[in-house]
Amino acid sequence: MIKKGLIGGAVLLLIFLIYLSTMDRKVYYLVLGDSLATSEGADGLKVRGYTDIVAENLEKRDVLEEYIKGFAEDGMKVPDLIDDIEDNREIEVNGKTIRIKNALVKADLVTLSIGANDILEKLDSEYISDNDVYNYIDEMTDDLEELLKLIREYSKEDIIMVGYYNPFKDIDVQKFIDYLNKRYKEVSNVYDIIYVEIDDVFEKHPEYLPNENNIHPSSEGYEAIAELVMKKVNKNLFET
C-alpha cells in the first residue's frame, strides 16, 4: 500500500510539474515601435505584418496569452516612445485599460521597430553631408540607449529589436544603413536586446519593396522579417 501510494504521489507530482511548465510557457507579447510594427504595407494600407505573423505562430502553439499592439504608432520616433513610457501612456484593449509600464512588466516577449523616422528625415535632405549623417546616427544611438535603458527598467524578459533595411533603390545610402545597424546593434548588446538583421534579405529580394514611392515592405517582405524574428523567438523562448 505504501509503495502504491508513493507511485501515485510521484505521478501526481509529475502532472503538477508539467502543468506548471505549461503555464510558464504562456507568452504575453508586446509590440512597440513605428509603422513597421503597425504593419503598414507598400500600398499604404495595413497588411498582415511581421508582428501579426509572430502572434499567429504563438497562437498555433497554444502559448499566446496576450497580443498587445496598440502602443505602436505610425511615424513614431525614439523620443516619442521615451515620452510614452515616462508618461505611462494608456490604451484600451477589449474594454480594459492597459498602461505601457504594466505591459512591459508583464511581457514575456517584446518586439521593437524604431528609428526609421528619425533617420529618414535626415537622408531626405540634399544639403546634408556624409559627416553630418554619421554624427546624427551617433546622436540617435544615444537616444536609443536612453530608450533601451528605460525599457529594461520594466521588462526583464526577451526583447527583440528589428534592424534596418535600405528602402531606396536610387539613392546611395547603404553606407549609412550599415553604420546605423552597427551602432544600434552595439547598444542593443549592452542592454541584452536581441538584434535581428534584416538588411541582407531586402538586398537579395528587391521585390519585397515594390513601391518606389513607399518605403514599406510587401506582405512577402513582412513574412521574411517574421521568419527571422521567429528564429530568435524559438531559440530564446522555447529552447532555453
Image (spheres, rainbow, N blue to C red):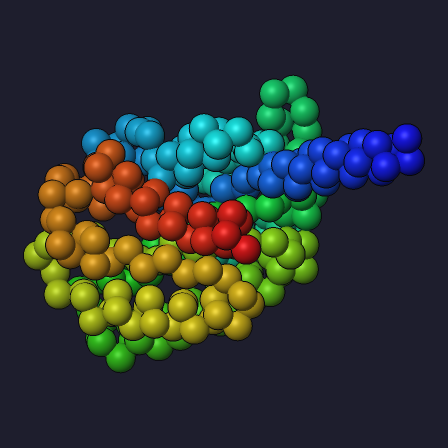
Residue 116: quarter of image: bottom left
Percent coordinates x, y for residue 102 in the rendering: 69, 43
Relative to 29, residue 236 above or below: below
Closer to the camera, 89 or 41? 41
Residue found 38% across the figure and 72% down from its top = 183
Residue 41's spot in the image, x, y percent? 27, 34
Can the viewer see residue 100 in this picture? no
Residue 23 shown left or right of residue 120 in the figure: right
Task: Give the answer, above or below, for where 122 lies relative to 75.
Answer: below
Direction from residue 86 to residue 220 in the image, left or right: left
Closer-to-camera residue (47/50):
50
Viewport quadrant of the N terminus: top right
Image coordinates of residue 95 in percent, x first then y, are: 65, 20
Of all residues, the one furthest to the right in this rendering is 2
- What residue sits 66% from the left and 41% below the top? 21
In percent of width and height, residue 86 lies at: 66, 53
For residue 58, above or below residue 119 = above
Residue 24 falls left or right of residue 111 = right
Count the numbered circles shown: 0
Residue 133, image quadrant: bottom left
- Name the residue rendered at 19%, 52% in the picture: 202
Residue sticking out furthest to the bottom: 131
User: Can the viewer see residue 153?
Assistant: yes
| The furthest residue to the left | 170
Work out whether residue 74 or residue 48 is closer to the camera in this orientation and state it: 48
Instruction: Work out which quarter of the rendered image holds the C terminus and state it.
Output: bottom right
* Quarter residue 25 falls in: top right
**Residue at 21% in and 37% down:** 220
